[in-house]
Amino acid sequence: QVQLVDSGGGSVQAGGSLTLSCAASGYTGGSCMGWFRQAPGKEREGVAAIYAVDGNTYYADSVKGRFTISRDNAKKTVYLLMNSLEPEDTAMYYCAARAPLWVGPPHFSYCAPLIDTRITGWGQGTQVTVSS
């Protein structure tokens, strides 16, 4: 089991930016590291992921062009830079480690689609609130 500690949430106005961090302990070298979010009354959804082996990234359509996921392997930390935040981005954000699995068409990837299966560790969550 991977231990994850996520941080960096807060309250911002629409159009603002936040950077979330996820610090890992334990082996994550072959994992898909990513972020999920859950708003009140809604199902949890995948936001972004990065494959620790080759750095390939994956994003939900709702955040493409606004969010950027990155990693620092030496620090075992994953970041989510969130720009142009919208009120619809308000949610609890959770860092997660997933075991990779090759998926063919249409994804052709180890980390997509962004679903909460094969989870090997969850962060405790960090709240992001965007006001209009």
Image (tube, rainbow, N blue to C red):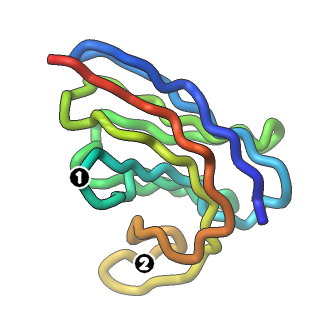
Q: Name the image quarter holding residue 63.
A: top left
Vertical order, 118 against 2 (above or below)? below
Which residue is at a point 58% across and 76% down the rendered structure image?
118
Q: Nearer the viewer, mark 1 or mark 2?
A: 1
Residue 11: % across, % down = 37, 17
Seen as rendered, the residue at the extreme front is 41
Vertical order, 24 against 11 (above or below)? below
Task: Name the one closer to the observer, 24 or 122.
Answer: 122
Which residue is at a point 61% across and 74% down the rendered structure image?
100
Residue 87: % across, % down = 19, 29
Which residue is at a point 41% across and 86% down the rendered structure image?
104
In the image: residue 71, left or right of residue 85 = right
Residue type for callout 1: Gly
Say what secondary structure mark 1 lies in: loop
* Residue pointed to by mark 1: 41
In the image: residue 8, left or right of residue 29 = left
In the image: residue 68, left or right of residue 64 = right
Seen as rendered, the residue at the extreme left is 132
Say what secondary structure mark 2 lies in: loop
Q: Quadrant of the N terminus?
A: bottom right
Residue 82: % across, % down = 39, 29
Residue type for callout 2: Phe
Which residue is at a point 24% across and 55% down the rendered structure image?
42
Vertical order, 102 against 72 (above or below)? below
Vertical order, 119 against 97 (above or below)? below
* Residue pointed to by mark 2: 108
